[in-house]
Amino acid sequence: MDQQQKVCARVSQKLAGTPERVYDAWLDPAMIGRFMFGPALRDEEIVRFTLDGRVGGRFSFVVRRQGQEIDHIGRYVEIDRPRRLVFTWAVALDRDDASRVTIEIVPAGAGCELTLVHELAPGFELFKDRVTEGWTKMLGALGMSLA
């Protein structure tokens, strides 16, 4: 990704779970189906989730919205449990490294604080607010799932 054209959506959320529990939710298909996708978040049906939770491993999260299947794909770039997770993010028709998501988790009181930065691909600058809203909604759902 061209560093000069990088646009980042950034979201932070305090969560009640331990850093380990919050981190593990990002690599657990059942949890991903509760906070990132599915009817609890938007009008969609989960078709299938696959993931290989190791550096270089890939994931595919397929959902059906308005009769159309959408495959969210990516590759895990960095896995440092329970502090940092980095992965690429795209829809199957795009390159699988179209954008990059970095998650950092730090202890905060009895829980933790998660900061997510989504580096958008060039050409997606107009989607920054929409991406920020989406991740904010997902992190809120993560907090509810962990409660």
Image (tube, rainbow, N blue to C red):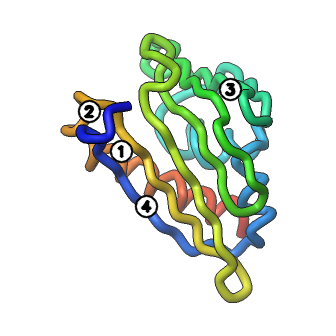
Mark 2 surroundings: few (<14), some (14-19) or many (≥20) residues within 10 A: some
Give above or below for 89 relative to 40. above
* Cα gap from disc 2 to disc 1, whole angstroms: 10 Å
Dot 1: element: helix
Left or right: where 73 falls relative to 76: left
The mark nearer the N terminus, 1 or 4, is 4
Q: Which residue is mark 2?
A: 124
Q: Quadrant of the N terminus?
A: top left
Q: Position of residue 115 (x, y in %)?
A: 52, 63
Q: Which mark is residue 131?
A: 1
Q: Which residue type does callout 3 highlight?
A: Phe
Dot 4: element: strand
Q: Which residue is mark 3?
A: 59
* Cα gap from disc 2 to disc 3, whole angstroms: 22 Å
The mark nearer the N terminus, 4 or 3, is 4
Q: Which mark is residue 11?
A: 4
